[in-house]
Image: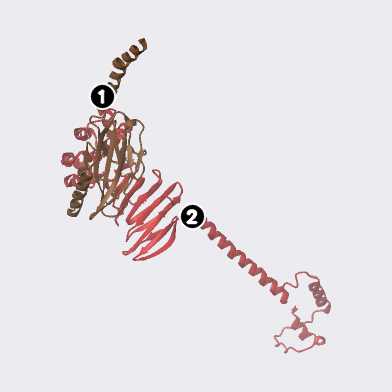
Chain colours: A red, B brown
Amino acid sequence: MKMFWNRPNRRVAGPSRGTDYPPRPDLGIPLVKAPDSIWNAIEAQRARSPTSNLASGPASSLRWQLAIAAVVVLLIGAVVMLQRYANRERPSWNVVRVQGTKEIAGRLSEGEWMDTNNAGRARIDVGEIGIVEIEPNSRVRLVAAKPGEGRITLQRGELSAVISAPPRLFFVETPSSLAVDLGCAYRMKTDDQGNGQLHVTSGWVSLESDGHDSLVPAGAMCLTRRGLGPGTPYFEDAPAPLRQALDAFDVDRAQTKTGVLDTILNAARVRDTLTLWHLLSKTTGNDRLRVFDRMTALVPLPSAVTRDKVLTLDPEALKHWREELAWKW
Amino acid sequence: MEMVTTQSFFANRIVAPLTIMGALAGIISAADFSLEIGNPAAALVKVKKNATLVVRPLGCSEGANFHIEGNSVQASGETQVSVPLTFGRGGTSTPVFAVGASPSLGGTFWLMVLSADCAGSKAGALIPIDARGVYNRAAAKFLNHAPTKKEIDDALKTLARDTARGDSK
């Protein structure tokens, strides 16, 4: 025996409630009328239930719509707040993109990349401490824009930086080295292979990689190679033989035994003591002694600096000598 | 009478020789007075970051008496523009001065004109600076007097000629 707990069936089965519905097909199942007491109890229960009105009727539908609308509004508000919060947490610098004669101002946030095409340039305000100009066909990323640290990556292309801030506040990362601003104007290039060039026009820059530093003063330049790091700096007007030999020395120091170091020492002028000073820490034994001898032949050793301290690479002695040598650069 | 005699004694035997010795010492100390220029790396951290170069006196033992001034000078045809340089004392024992950067007069080069004094002795320098703000030591002239108008004009002409030839660097 089956019972049908729906009202139409009941109505079909109950002639006293009216028979407006078409008769059910005969499925061979006997229909049994539910007792009226059951339906009355159900009706009474529904009337008493406080939630019964939510399930149906126009008022119930309106409440659901309002609830959904409120949730949507809250979600939108949350998204907007999150975006604003995220923007506050990611410092940024002002950028002006220059395309021909057209200039477009915008912002570059930490973590963002910026590309210039073959006719495009960009000018970045490095907070309040300077300006970086991005040349065409360059790709840069803003790594840090904090008050105590400005750092960008030059993945490819060329930039010029003019910085007026205390030393070691602004950094340019390249695939082969890190340029640390000691003040204050320089040009940095990086090719697709990650090799680069640094030209300093004012103050000086420290080019660093894996604990090796090359100090590059105004008027000097330094090559940097992927896998090898910064090379030995030299003045841009250095004699061609010195530059060529230095290139060979930086790529393969074993060549010092085949006369490369001789060429460098013979070609060095007074202001090339910049290069020789760096070679002191890149040579050992008799080669270091030869570099020292050539330097003292070009510029007398200051009284406060001793031969032994230089040959043992005493940091204070080397620093003092470098500062004194710089009067000849 | 006795007083007059004592005053004469001090004037003739002590004060006068001391005065002469002092003057001689000043002259001797500044006898070989000259200027030396260097890369700002020579006085790292002590100089203004935008210094074009640093300059110090040689043969001037009386640092407190050392005085220096100068201009950046640029010529365009017959027109000559001159702007005072700014200096800053860098060291404590030896006077080291950082020299301000280009006056941005435009053009491709300018001339740094320095005049210095040490206990009455004079020294000067004429230093070419290229468009990037890098000084040309090889072309610099160091003088035992303040540069004259003619020396400045001649240096500018030489600089213009060298620049036209492309070897100003």
Q: Residue at x 67, y 68 (%)?
A: A67
Query: Closer to the camera, A171 or B110?
Result: B110
Q: Residue at x 28, y 18 (%)?
A: B17
Which quadrant of the rendered structure holds the C terminus of chain A?
top left
Q: Residues within 10 Å of mark 1 (few under 14, many from 20)?
A: few
Task: Please state which amino acid type lies under the numbered disc 1.
Answer: Leu
Q: Position of residue A266 (x, y in %)?
A: 16, 39
Secondary element under disc 2, as helix, strand or loop, is loop
Q: Chain of mark 1?
A: B
Disc 2 with disc 1 on a shared chain: no
Q: Is B4 above or below relative to B51?
A: above
Residue with the most extreme top position: B2
Q: Which residue is mark 2?
A: A90
Q: Which residue is mark 1?
A: B24
Q: Are marks 2 and 1 in contact (CB under 8 Å)?
A: no
Secondary element under disc 1, as helix, strand or loop, is helix
Q: Residues within 10 Å of mark 2 (few under 14, many from 20)?
A: some
Task: Please state which amino acid type lies under the numbered disc 2.
Answer: Arg
Asked if residue A69 lies left or right of residue A187, the reply is right
Q: Quadrant of residue A138?
A: bottom left
C-alpha distance separating marks 2 and 1: 68 Å
Q: Chain of mark 2?
A: A
- The tag on residue A130 is none
Q: Position of residue A107 (x, y in %)?
A: 44, 59
